[in-house]
Structure formats: structure tokens, C-alpha cells
Image: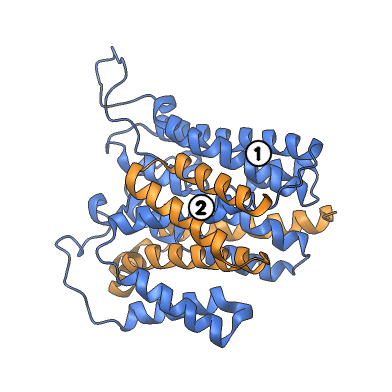
Chain colours: A blue, B orange
Amino acid sequence: MQPPPTTPVQTPAPQPRHLSALVLSVPVAMGYIPLGTAFGFLFVQAGAPWWLAVVASSIVFAGAAQFMMVPMLAAGLPLATIALATLVVNLRHIFYGLSLLHKLPAQPWARWYLVFALTDETYSVLTTLPADTPARQMVAVALLNQGWWLLGTLLGAVIGAQAQVGWVGLDFALAALFAVLAVEQWRSAHSTAPLWVAVVSYGVALTVLPQQALLVAIGLCVLTALALPKTKPAPQNHNVSGHPASAAKDRA
Amino acid sequence: MIDTTYALGALGAMAAVTFGLRALPFLAARFLQSHPLVQRLGRFLPLAIMTLLLLHTLVGSARDNPSGPWAELAAVATVIVLQGWRRQALLSILTGTALYVLMRNY
């Protein structure tokens, strides 16, 4: 959500560059606890038992996809549709790994848990850690982040199971989250072309095939990105993995 | 009521897809790193997809709103301005959502 604090908070330790995992995950907690609460609440209000919300946050652990699935499950959409929508919503995660290839620890358990837990926010914290960060600390940050998400989910599920809230519009939190992430992407983007291409693509898709507007629009964006003349070569774009500054679009 | 078996199946599928996507770069690293088109997509798509997700959820909300898209537009403008100005994600999200809930219910 916010960049982790850069000032060492009262660290008498000899290496002030290494902030504790807890300090690093505090900004994430500020976002994950309320968002997780919103997810648990909405899911239970949509008719799911509380423990199902906890299972979702344990095994899926992808904020936007979890919000997206609430109306889809409530509508009883086919599994293939839900899987495809998850693919579309989480497609961006492919590009996160590219900038972390050499950064994640080699020990299998640590490496694969971090891969599993590579949410937008965990990614943004990991990219800011110094290269010699021990595996234990990286795993601790990811575990804490998922812990905040689970805590929020549980809170929301318990509240949602008891409250009969007549308000509509709480799910706007998701649109607001996307708006925040879009602003942050825009801030770190090389150009604003993707934004305009996306707007036009969505307009076209909505006219041509309104039922599948999102999917069609993403297709159009991919085609446009591939067809666009090569933009001015950014100084570091010959190497994605070696340059966190170019590939690690800090977000969230 | 959401059927539990069905929901568990969906969650399993979602977990597999999500993990697959997150793991792909680590499994296909050499291909992805050497392919200029993949790199171009990696620079272009994040902002494009986030914009699309925003538009899509806004259109969805506006469709459910009998009194037109003005509440959605006002709330999202608030979020964008707040985020651009203060850079506090939580503040932006909570303010925008609260404003929207107020406009829709009162």
C-alpha cells in the first residue's frame, strides 16, 4: 500500500539496512486488514459459510480475484468461467516473478511459499529489500502479510455472519482499490499509452461483445502492445531481471 | 446460499490458476527473459489491465444503479484525486467507498 518506512525505526542492531519483517509488513497490514475484512464480510453476506472465506484467503490469497469471485459464486457461474476470470485478473503476476528471479531464496520451501504468496503488496515489499536479505526474513514478511489478510478475512466473516446490513455499495471498495493501483501504475509507467489503449479497447469491446467486454478488451490491449511501433528504448530495457528499477514497477 | 462443494471446487481452480501464474516466470525464466515481446507486454500490460479492471467494475456498479453513473464517477474521481495527492491507499479507498455508500443509500 505505502512504501515501507525507509528510516530505521530504533534499530540498535549493527545492520540498520535490515528492517525487521514486522516493520516491513506494517504498511501492508494497514491495507490487508480492512480489505480482508471487506472480503470476508461480502463473501459471507453473499451466502458463504465463514470458514469458506478463511479457506479462500488461505489457498487462493489474491485480493482482486477473491473479490471478483464473490458475485460469480453467488451467481453459480461455471468453474471454467471462474478459472478464466482468475487467469485474466491475475495475469499481471507473471510479470512480477521476472524481476525476482534471482532474488528469491534457493531453498525449495522458502522459494515456493514466496512464489505462492506473491501478491501485489508482498511483491512490492520484496523488490525493495536489499539483495542480501536472508531467506528467513523474506518468508517472514510474506507470512506476516498473509497473516494480516487472514485476520481481516476472519474478522469480516464473523461480522458478516451476524450483521444484516442493508447498505448497498460496499463492494465499491474493489473499484476504489483498482483506481488506487491504476494511479500507482500510471505514476511508474514509461508512458500513458497503455491507459488510453485500455480505455479505447474497453469502449470497443463493450460495443462489440458486451457480455465478454473484459476479456475482449484485454485481447485488444495485448494485440495493440505487440503491434505498436517500438517505443523509445528505455535505457535499461535490455535486461528485465537485473534491473529492479526498470522491471519492478513499484506499486501499491 | 452458496453450495459448499461447488465453492470449494471453484476455490481449488482459482488457487491452481493463481499459483500457476505466479510460478510461470520461475519455470520458464529463460524463455521469458530472452523474448523481447514478453518484455514489451510486461511494460505495457500492468497499467492497461489495471485501467480495464477499473473500467469494468465501474461499468458493473453503474449498471446496478438505477439513478445513473454519477455516483460512480464522483466516487472514483475522489479516489483518483486523493491517491494522486496524498498517496495513502487506505485513505483513498475508505473515503471513496464511504462516499459511494452514502450516495447510494441516502
> How far from the left and from the top, in percent, is residue A213?
56, 77
Q: Residue furthest left?
A: A235
- Location of residue B48 with respect to A69 vertically, above or below: below
Q: Can residue B56 be seen in this view?
A: yes
Element at label 1: helix
Q: In the rendered picture of this protein, how many numbered marks are placed on residues?
A: 2
Asked whether the residues under marks 1 and 2 belong to the same chain, the reply is yes
Q: Of residues B18 and B82, which is closer to you in this image?
A: B82
Q: Which mark is residue A176?
A: 2
Q: Which residue lies furthest to the front in this view?
A: B106
Pointer 1 and pointer 2: residues touching (CB < 8 Å)?
no
Q: Of residues A28 and B60, which is closer to you in this image?
A: B60
Q: In terms of sequence position, does the residue under pointer 1 or pointer 2 come before the other?
A: 1
> How far from the left and from the top, in percent, is residue A54?
70, 41
Q: Which mark is residue A153?
A: 1
Element at label 2: helix
Q: Mark 1 lies on which chain?
A: A
Badge 2 crowding class, 10 Å Cα cut-off, few under 14, some 14 to 19, many 20 or more, is many
Badge 1 crowding class, 10 Å Cα cut-off, few under 14, some 14 to 19, many 20 or more, is many
Q: What residue type is labelled 1?
A: Thr
Image quadrant where one finds the N terminus of chain A? top left
